[in-house]
């Protein structure tokens, strides 16, 4: 039976670890997307397109960072 | 951002339950074989894994690649499905070789032999590992998708060779038990039902894995796009900030380039 046991243990363990890795990768991806979307919504701190410096706290970016 | 659909979770749960039932039936309920003894219990594991790898995963990869290459159905959706199917297929293909080797050692006396079935299956793994390597080569998504679709179709040529290897050449590996020429399975009773359940369990597992892996692929593409947009916004913002110093005039109307939509103009800025 040791060959049979070895076959089942190896196959099911590999599939379990792979399934777990898929879940982790998906969750990591969802979190990274959320962060990327926030970065996109938040203005670059202290800078506007027109080049006018924005006072600290007025950009909204600090609030975004603080909530992460 | 949308969560994983409900059906994926249902398929995942069904895969866990059916796999557990298969293992229970395979190891504790079904009788040992007259010739192989307890080694026959590997029949509920090795063929279903091979079925998923060789026929389902690589078949789906080839079909998706074909649909991508066909102009009427060309969509990155098919490219992502192919990528997901190949990765899952590679895992199952590697397990096919490992479980086959574990079965071969007590049956044939060797872990590995350059048998037609074994060699063509190993070649299949190498070909699809090549496909995965090709996906990692930096390129435009459309160009990458086209390259990979062609690679998947080329690799898929090995699948019929794997299937018919036991017919075309004299091999140590036994012939087809279920998918034989007469389509009449040559096993009976509780063994046949357990084997059928094994096929269903691993098929459900495959469907769940491809669905989750597809979602990972979509997320990865979207993150790439978002990061690119953030980088562009930063670049444009830097450019606008540096311009007044360098040129002394500036672009005060805020319409200087594609960075504009990404940076909010403060209220009352004199527009």
Image (cartoon, rainbow, N blue to C red):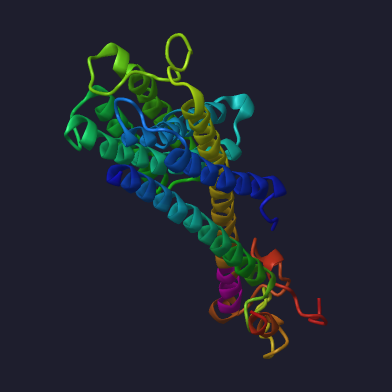
Q: Which residues are magenta?
A: B234-242
- Spot the residue most to the bottom: A56
Residue B211 vs residue B136, the one in the foreground: B211
* Residue sitting at x 55%, y 53%: B216
Query: Is residue B150 depicted above or below B241 in this figure?
Result: above
Residue B265 vs residue A23, the one in the foreground: A23
* In magenta stretch: residue B146: no
* Residue sitting at x 38%, y 46%: A8
Judge whether residue B181 can be spotted in this image. yes
Q: Is residue B63 left or right of residue B262?
A: left
Q: How many marks?
A: 0
Where is residue A59 drawn, in percent x and y? 70, 83
Judge whether residue B129 can be spotted in this image. no
Query: Is residue B225 depicted above or below B214 in this figure?
Result: below
Q: Is residue B15 left or right of residue B34?
A: right
Image-quadrant location for residue B266: bottom right
* Residue sitting at x 67%, y 77%: A48
- Spot the residue most to the top: B182
* Residue sitting at x 69%, y 70%: A41
Residue B25 vs residue B158, the one in the foreground: B25
Per the picture, the main secondary structure of the magenta-coloured stretch is helix
Say which quadrant the N terminus of chain B sits in. Answer: bottom right
Query: Is residue B255 depicted above or below B53 in this figure?
Result: below
Image-quadrant location for residue A68: bottom right
Where is residue B207 drawn, in percent x and y? 57, 40
Where is residue B52 drawn, in percent x and y? 46, 34
């Amino acid at each position: 039976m040791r060959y049979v046991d070895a076959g089942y243990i190896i196959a099911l363990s590999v599939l379990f670890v792979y399934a777990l890795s898929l879940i982790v990768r998906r969750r990591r991806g969802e979190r990274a997307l959320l962060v990327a979307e926030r970065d996109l919504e938040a203005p670059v701190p202290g800078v506007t397109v027109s080049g006018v410096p924005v006072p600290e706290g007025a950009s909204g970016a600090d609030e975004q960072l603080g909530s992460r | 951002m949308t969560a994983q659909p409900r059906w994926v979770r249902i398929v995942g749960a069904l895969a866990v339950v059916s796999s557990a039932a298969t293992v229970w039936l395979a190891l504790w309920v079904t009788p040992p074989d007259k010739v192989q003894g307890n080694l026959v219990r590997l029949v509920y594991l090795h063929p279903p894994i091979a079925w998923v790898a060789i026929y389902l995963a690589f078949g789906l990869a080839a079909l998706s690649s074909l649909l991508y290459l066909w102009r009427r159905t060309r969509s990155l959706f098919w490219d992502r499905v192919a990528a997901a199917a190949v990765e899952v297929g590679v895992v199952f293909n590697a397990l096919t070789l490992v479980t086959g080797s574990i079965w071969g050692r007590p049956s044939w006396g060797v872990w590995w032999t350059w048998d037609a079935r074994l060699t063509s299956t190993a070649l299949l793994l190498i070909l699809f590992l090549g496909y995965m390597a090709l996906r990692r080569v930096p390129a435009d998504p459309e160009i990458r998708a086209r390259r990979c679709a062609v690679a998947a179709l080329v690799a898929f040529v090995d699948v019929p060779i794997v299937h018919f290897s036991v017919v075309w050449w004299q091999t140590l590996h036994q012939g087809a038990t279920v998918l034989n020429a007469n389509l009449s399975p040559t096993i009976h009773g509780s063994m046949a039902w357990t084997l059928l359940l094994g096929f269903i369990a691993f098929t459900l597992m495959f469907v769940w894995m491809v669905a989750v892996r597809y979602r990972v692929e979509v997320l990865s593409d979207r993150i790439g796009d978002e990061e690119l947009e953030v980088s562009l916004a930063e670049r444009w913002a830097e450019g606008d900030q540096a311009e007044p110093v360098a040129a002394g005039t500036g672009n005060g109307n805020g319409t200087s380039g594609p960075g504009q939509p990404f940076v909010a103009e403060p209220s009352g800025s004199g527009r």
